[in-house]
Image: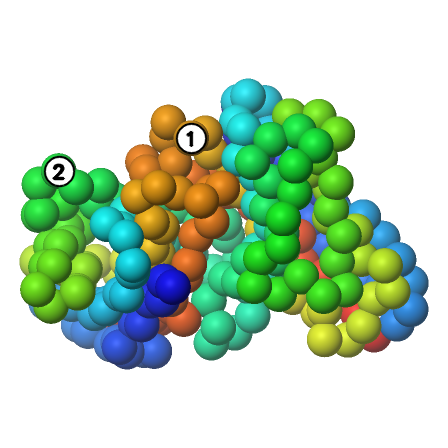
Amino acid sequence: NAGVTQTPKFQVLKTGQSMTLQCAQDMNHEYMSWYRQDPGMGLRLIHYSVGAGITDQGEVPNGYNVSRSTTEDFPLRLLSAAPSQTSVYFCASTTPGQSNYGYTFGSGTRLTVV
Amino acid sequence: AQSVTQLDSHVSVSEGTPVLLRCNYSSSYSPSLFWYVQHPNKGLQLLLKYTSAATLVKGINGFEAEFKKSETSFHLTKPSAHMSDAAEYFCVVSDRLNQGGKLIFGQGTELSVKP
């Protein structure tokens, strides 16, 4: 089915380890973004991209890197995991023409850093 | 700058009674406004959206919201709560120019429905 696919669904990391959260969409959406969800804080924007080769920082970018080599994929890299990065991560996509009409979200990745 | 404030972190209602979840926003531009719902351990589902058409917006599952520019509000209502409505609800704003698909989320309101 068409949509936004996030992998893995669950991950446990040790402090200092690195990893990549994967996000892929098959709807040819230009806009993609990463959010983290923490209790009582809603979702906060980490990084976003308006197209292949173009990325920018959101509200909470520290400790995360992104790249956008293709329209379909937008991976999120944790360079050196910290307990403060324990969270649920969501990837979302839309197009400029549809962005006022709703976004498609992935099912999330639950990350625990110990 | 844009921001969203959900005025209640938790709302509890009895099944069959009305639901009101309050949301105020701040936006430098004409906003697009959304309500999303998240059931426990699930992803986010779009309930409804306002994009400058009718100010009273109808969504799925009997929910609706009214855009009031003078009050900068976008409250979510439902005439009669159902047990399946128990979830967390997020009010979300995006400016009409939609700078790169950025969404600003409120802190969320947890809705409990008592039998």
Q: In this view, does A83 lie above or below A49?
A: below
- The residue that appears at 28% across and 78% down in the rendered structure is B8
- The residue that appears at 52% across and 27% down in the rendered structure is A29
- Residue sitting nearer the eye, B62 or A54: A54
Secondary structure of the residue carrying tag 1 is: loop
Q: Please give left or right for residue A100 compared with residue A47 in the image.
A: left
The reply to whether label 2 and label 1 mark residues of one chain is: no
Give how far apart the Cα atoms at labels 2 and 1 are.
18 Å
- Residue sitting nearer the eye, B109 or B54: B54
Q: In this view, does A61 lie above or below A100?
A: below
Chain of the residue that carries numbered disc 2 in the rendered image: B
- Whether residue A74 is visible to the viewer of this picture, yes or no, is yes
- The residue that appears at 65% across and 37% down in the rendered structure is A54
Q: Name the residue under label 2.
A: B53
Question: Of the numbered discs in the image, which one, if any, rests on residue A96?
Answer: 1
> On the rendered image, what quadrant is the C terminus of chain A found in?
bottom right
**Which of the 4 image quadrants contains residue B82?**
bottom left
Q: In this view, does A68 lie above or below B37?
A: above
Q: Is residue B51 above or below residue A108?
A: above
- Whether residue A73 is visible to the viewer of this picture, yes or no, is no
Q: In the rendered structure, which amino acid carries the disc numbered 1?
A: Pro
Q: Do the residues labelled 2 and 1 touch (CB within 8 Å)?
A: no
| Image coords of residue B69 (percent x, y) | 12, 59
- Residue sitting nearer the eye, B49 or A68: A68
| Image coords of residue A84 (percent x, y) | 72, 75
> On the rendered image, what quadrant is the N terminus of chain A found in?
top right
